[in-house]
């Protein structure tokens, strides 16, 4: 009986997701905590998996009139004197960590952010984005990639011209601390955002709910779809219809076959709807219909680390 009970018991991961869903459901909309992304990242996205680029290569994602390019910057290892390329940020951790860093910057009103936690594990535990050492290592790696990348976002205007901004994201990390020069410890109590990135973030911040992103924290595509919905739905004047090929261009560049994308996108939508229950959208054989919905979070709420 005991063995059978253990087999029927949800995994630790499933139990964690169920707890996060309940916490989100019980948190009033006006009390949800804010994370932020630049609005451009509701149109084009970081890679969902490790792109494994050569040093001279850049990541590029194009969707409609928007294009994102992420370029690697070499960093010198003072122990070896050699330049190293750490790769571009990818996956859900990169998205979540950038959202937290953005929120702290906007809350504190400065591109120099004071982190009220003396270690990375304590910081991640306080914001609920880690359950153990492996996730801490993943977060450390993604911060390293954020600190050694430049993002370039361009927008094609109706007259055919293009607006482009090159934005180094995060700076100010000690990539190879003297105490343990062989490791990427990557922790200081102060983080600096580049001035260009900071100015863009202040002009065009997209608020997202921390409670929702915790639910989606294991799925990069779900975070991207959620960001898209958070930006588009509340401002719609009439229903928006997007064909399956357009949806694949936005959310399925890493999937070759359309039938595989359709299955994954339907699953992604189910997961996102568990978090963002107010979102109104549907799909059929032709494509997706999106309707005006309440924003997932009210404005002017601050993100606070306890």
Image (tube, rainbow, N blue to C red):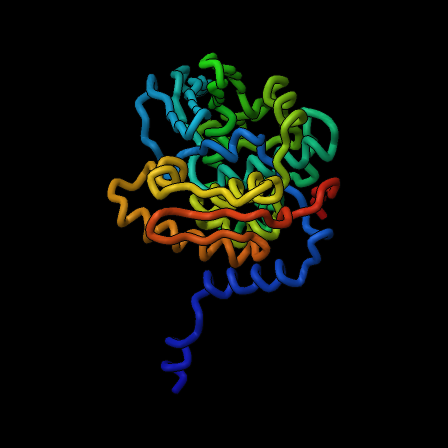
Q: Is residue 148 left or right of residue 119?
A: left
- Report the residue at 37% width, 37% height from top: 246
User: Could you tell me which residue is drawn at 53 percent across and 19 percent down?
Assistant: 167
User: From what the image shows, is residue 34 above or below residue 98?
Assistant: below
Q: Which residue is situated farthest in the bottom direction here?
A: 1
- Which residue sits at x=59%, y=55%? 278
Is 207 drawn above or below residue 19 in the view shown? above
264 sits to left or right of 143: left
Q: Is residue 135 visible?
A: no
Residue 281 visible somewhere in the drawing? yes
Q: Position of residue 193 (x, y in %)?
A: 61, 24
Q: Is residue 69 left or right of residue 303?
A: left
In the image as oriented, which residue stretches furthest toward the front? Answer: 238
Q: Quadrant of the N terminus?
A: bottom left
Return the residue nearer the eye: 125 or 151. 151
Q: Is residue 227 above or below residue 168?
A: below
Residue 27, image x, y percentages = 68, 58
Q: Residue at x 48, y 14 (%)?
A: 159
Q: Between 186 and 218, which is closer to the camera in this rendering?
A: 218
The percent position of residue 28, horizontal first and vertical second, equals: 70, 57
**Tag count in the figure?**
0
**Rendered position, 227 above or below 180:** below
């Amino acid at each position: 009986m005991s063995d059978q009970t253990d087999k029927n018991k949800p995994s630790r991961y499933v139990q964690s997701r169920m707890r996060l869903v309940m916490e989100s459901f019980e948190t009033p909309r006006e009390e949800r905590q804010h994370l932020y992304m630049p609005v451009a990242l509701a149109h084009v996205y970081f890679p969902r998996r490790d792109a494994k680029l050569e040093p001279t290569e850049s990541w590029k994602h194009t969707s409609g009139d928007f294009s994102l390019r992420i370029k690697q910057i070499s960093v010198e290892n003072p122990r070896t004197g050699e330049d190293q390329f750490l790769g571009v940020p990818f996956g859900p951790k990169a998205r979540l960590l950038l959202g937290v860093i953005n929120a702290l910057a906007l809350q504190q009103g400065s591109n120099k952010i004071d982190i009220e936690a003396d270690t990375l594990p304590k910081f991640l535990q306080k914001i609920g984005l880690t359950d153990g050492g492996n996730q801490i290592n993943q977060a450390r790696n993604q911060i390293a990639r954020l600190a050694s990348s430049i993002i370039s976002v361009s927008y094609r205007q109706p007259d055919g011209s293009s607006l482009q901004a090159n934005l180094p994201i995060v700076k100010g990390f000690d990539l190879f601390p003297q105490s343990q020069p062989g490791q990427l410890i990557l922790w200081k109590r102060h983080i600096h955002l580049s001035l260009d990135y900071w100015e863009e973030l202040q002009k065009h911040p997209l608020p997202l709910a921390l409670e929702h992103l915790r639910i989606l924290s294991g799925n990069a595509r779900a975070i991207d779809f959620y960001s898209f919905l958070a930006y588009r739905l509340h401002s719609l004047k009439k229903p928006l219809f997007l064909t399956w090929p357009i949806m694949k261009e936005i959310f399925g560049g890493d999937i070759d076959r359309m039938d595989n994308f359709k299955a994954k996108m339907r699953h992604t939508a189910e997961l996102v709807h568990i978090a963002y229950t107010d979102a109104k959208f549907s799909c059929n054989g032709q494509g997706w219909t999106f309707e005006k919905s309440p924003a997932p979070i009210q404005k002017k709420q601050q993100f606070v680390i306890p």
